[in-house]
Image (spheres, coloured by chain):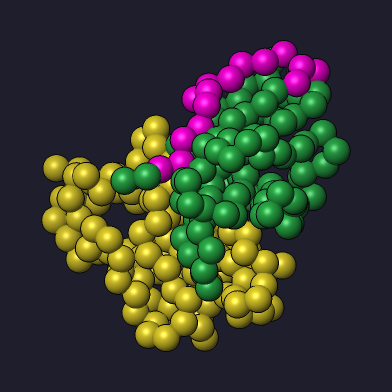
Amino acid sequence: EPEVTQTPSHQVTQMGQEVILRCVPISNHLYFYWYRQILGQKVEFLVSFYNNEISEKSEIFDDQFSVERPDGSNFTLKIRSTKLEDSAMYFCASRKRGLYNEQFFGPGTRLTVL
Amino acid sequence: AQSVTQLDSQVPVFEEAPVELRCNYSSSVSVYLFWYVQYPNQGLQLLLKYLSGSTLVKGINGFEAEFNKSQTSFHLRKPSVHISDTAEYFCAVSEGEGGSEKLVFGKGTKLTVNP
């Protein structure tokens, strides 16, 4: 069964460094999302992406964040200058076109900022 | 803006006992409702969803949920749990047709099924 994959599973970085989190959505899906979960808190929406542009973003998704679909398979989240408070589990999700279809989630990348 | 409250952070039960995981939401617009499950070291998997129609929704693994608009609730139930149901369960809401598709999640309920 096709699934969303994410790499790496765990990323450790120093404060101020740039990180890129990678996701490979399911191949026939057209809508892509990033969510994050800070330890002990709720899963929070960051951004949705369709047709090579951001369709919606949250207040969290400030200028330090960007998303890209550099080729036909990958979907990336970049954090330009990481802060301690960016430490969280980051989930990628995708869905296919339809009235309302399920968002399929990846296993997540745990980002630790030191 | 929407919000979701999961009243229980942890629920321990014995195997073969029934379980109910509670979820309440608030929204000023019509909503779609979801329950996701997360097993250790895995992503979120959809258990069931309510979009419209019958308020009793059946999902995978024997779970079901009932949408109660007057009480703004969407509680998850299973009549007899298994050890393998041990996981974290998340209730989520999104706006209805034509609205934002972002999912707003509750904090999750850790279900532990003991032998």
The residue sitting at 67% across, 72% down in the picture is B99
Q: Is residue A36 above or below residue B14?
A: above
- Residue A42 in view (yes/no): no
Question: Residue B104's quadrant in the figure?
Answer: bottom right
Image: magenta residue range: A3-18
Residue B63 percent coordinates (x, y): 28, 64
The colour one sees for chain A in the rendered image is green
Q: Is residue A104 above or below residue B50?
A: above
The residue sitting at 58% across, 20% down in the picture is A11
Classify the position of the N terminus of chain B by image quarter: bottom right
Q: On the picture, is A90 further left or further right than A46?
A: left
* Chain given the colour yellow: B
Residue A5 is one of the magenta-drawn residues:
yes
Question: Residue A81's quadrant in the figure?
Answer: top right
Residue B62 is one of the magenta-drawn residues:
no
Front-most of A43 and B15? A43
Question: Residue A83's quadrant in the figure?
Answer: top right
Q: Is residue B27 above or below residue B42?
A: below
As drawn, the residue found furthest toward the front would be A72
Q: On the picture, is A44 further left or further right than B81?
A: right
Classify the position of the C terminus of chain B by image quarter: top left
- Residue A86 in view (yes/no): yes
Q: Is residue A81 above or below residue A23?
A: above
Residue A91 percent coordinates (x, y): 55, 40
Front-most of B114 and A64? A64
Residue B73 percent coordinates (x, y): 48, 74
Residue B67 percent coordinates (x, y): 43, 78
